[in-house]
Image (spheres, rainbow, N blue to C red):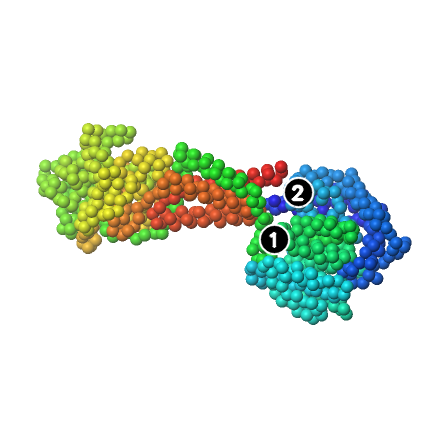
Amino acid sequence: MSKLIVLNLGKGNLHQGFPAVIAQLWQTDTPTPMQFTGGLPAAPQLEHLYQRWQQMYTALYASLGWRSGNIADFEIDEEDVTHISQTEFDNLCQELQDSLNTWLNSSLFLNIDRKLRTQLSPKEEIRCIITAELPQVLKLPWCLWHFFSDYPQAEIALSPPEYARVKTNPQKSKGKVRILAILGDRQGIDLEKDQNLLRQLPNAELKFLVEPNRSQLTEQLWESGWDILFFAGHSSSQGKGRMLLNSGESLTIDQLKYGLQKAIAQGLQLAIFNSCDGLGLAEDLADLHLPQVIVMREPVPDRVAQEFLKHFLTLFSRGKTLYAAVREARERLQSLEDDFPCATWLPVICQNPAEISPTWQDLCGGRLGLYLPRPNFKQLPAVFLNSFSVTLIIVLIRLFGGLQTLELEAFDKLMQLRPKEQPDSRLLVITITDQDIQAQGHEPRQGSLSDKYLNLLLTKLEQYQPVAIGLDIYRDFPVSNDRPELAKRMQKSDRLIAICKRADPKYDPAGISPPPEIPEARLGFSDFVEDNDGVLRRHLLAMTPNPISSSCTAASAFSVQLAFVYLKKQGITAKFTENWDLQLGNKIFPRLQNRTGGYQSIDGQGSQILLNYRFSPSVQAIAPQVTLSQVLNGQVNPNALKNRIILIGVTSNSSSDYWYTPDGKNPSEIIPGVIIQAQMVSEILSAALDQRPLLWAWSQWADICWILGWSLTGGLLAWYVRKTAYLSIAITAASVILFGLCLIVLTQGVWIPLVPPMISLLLSSTIFIFISKKFQKL
């Protein structure tokens, strides 16, 4: 993780001191900085030493071929320094370094120094930007500050006190770094080596301007899509920053202002002036808010310029950050200091603090603007260990039922979001409402439907030849003696299926007996299996009869009996296997086990499957519905009855046969039992005839692998995208993808975990952020 220090010296000078110095410390994953205050005392001797050093440096290098526009531009006055010794110059360099560090170790600055060191680690990459209103103080060799010896991953950059971000509209294709390389007047220097070094860059598109004139350079600046502007040749900052284009023409930044503004607006990120005394050029470019400039702070010998360029380009193009590449390339110049003293002092970055320094990959078009620091591959073992640990914890909590409630609620939400389906036209529901009950008058009855009206209804229905008639009404009493035709019809009809209720030791030890007139082959139990929250999500298909404990000995559910009758008419064999799995034709649907999907602790007795509700557009609208009165009064089209399954059930307000479904748990959303029975019948018919899938779930091991995959996703995202704002976006996107996948797969009939992988995704990324921060502080 990289950190940024902006050290603002504010107003002041070396003669009067700097009374208000402010240091801001930024971390890449936090939107606001820490801020520390202090000051710096007057140090007039430092200014004198630096001026003396410049004079001796210029005199010492006077006989070398360097990249300055005109050696006469550098004034050598006060003393005759043309006959200095190397020892004298070395002593002056040491004195300047000691004086600079004495100044920075002053008590006024001590608070800033201590606070920064408390927050920083020598292992961290640190960008330190010095800003000041007085340009002269920026010319000091800040790289000699002992802070940079203690923090080997830190590098200095300079900036004026005012800076801003330019709105850019990059217009370039990805994959190439576009470089406009200006090779100026080459008198006395070798620029071919610079040219060859640039040609060796990977993924680079180069445009060379060799000793161009002003018109040629301006025209190229207006062309879109430059990433790097490179200049090699003679330049000077005496008076005004100036670069020599050819033997007869030199230019200032002001003379290229509009072309440079256009280039910056179109994405120019970096300018490299591998020439002498470039601080003046950088200062003028700062007014245009160019993100980064690399210059030589003093006149530079030709060989030093070439060596720096070679190392910097190699390191930067191979993935080093801009600051890390500059520091290493600068320090590698130490091997030349026997011949070229102070070579390591010369290269310096001039940074616009409002901009982010790019990597070579950024300039290729990969990640510019997001600033994703290069991931630390040494942390990958921690990523995997963290993800495996999170997965283990989530799986254990899940196995003990800790997530079952959340998973079932998530299942309900996904069910509600599935595409709506058309009602099942093979079914018709006849409801017995409060008005239907009242319309029976004083006719003797023991339940909601008297023998007289039941007989009328069955007579009417049989005229229209339905495939099956399901009587979802308890009749644990015989037909009255004055209705022998009803008793006979119930005994003989091969269409009529009736219900009974199995004994339940907890709620109903006796159960409810079937109608005495109905043979066992045409009986189905009406029992439902509700979850702990009262919602019906499972379809109980069959159970082993127990005649000792219950008078209801039906082995199959009411819905199964009706569906099997219909499928038999269609020529489809429907039965249960020896393992009590449902078989429709040649396809077998395994029954639920005690641990299936989000269920971790259920009573899986009998043959159960997940109830795949048809939302048409709601659970209530599964099939056309008519009332008892409408049928008896001839208000129903006979075609609506023929060849259908007719379900007869009570929907009056006085009935207790109401249930909650995944469609909602509000009191207004409870569903009559006869509608649930219609949903169950439709589920079986649709699976056999329409290839509509029954719901099933992955195995436990598949669920664990799925959870682990999303845990790894969270850990890897936190490892790769370490800036909090972008990580939040990435995690949100991953969560949306996970939710979408679960929804899409559910529409295909597969219930895969949503809550456990969602928790593992969030937990794994959060924990790794915490771990990585702890590592950074070690």
Q: Quadrant of the C terminus?
A: top right
Query: Judging from the image, what secondary structure is the residue with disc 2 in?
Result: strand
Q: Few, some or many C-alpha atoms within 10 Å of disc 2 (few <14, some 14-19, many ≥20)?
A: some
In the rendered image, is residue 456 in sight? no
Q: Residue at x 72, y 43 (%)?
A: 149
* Amino acid type of the residue tagged 2 in the rendering: Met
- In this figure, which residue is indicated by the disc labeled 2? 34
Residue 662 figure quarter: top left
Q: Residue at x 66, y 69 (%)?
A: 219
**Spot occupied by residue 606 in the image (x, y as percentages of width and height):** 26, 36
**On the picture, is 201 further left or further right than 80?**
left
**On the picture, is 708 further left or further right than 73?**
left
Q: CA distance from mark 1 to mark 2?
A: 32 Å
Looking at the image, is 211 positioned above or below residue 509?
below
**Spot occupied by residue 28 in the image (x, y as percentages of width and height):** 61, 46
Q: Few, some or many C-alpha atoms within 10 Å of disc 1 (few <14, some 14-19, many ≥20)?
A: some
Tell how many labels: 2
**Spot occupied by residue 639 in the image (x, y as percentages of width and height):** 19, 55
Between residues 98 and 47, which one lies in front from this camera angle? 98
- In this figure, which residue is indicated by the disc labeled 1? 318
Q: Residue at x 87, y 55 (%)?
A: 82
Residue 517 figure quarter: top left
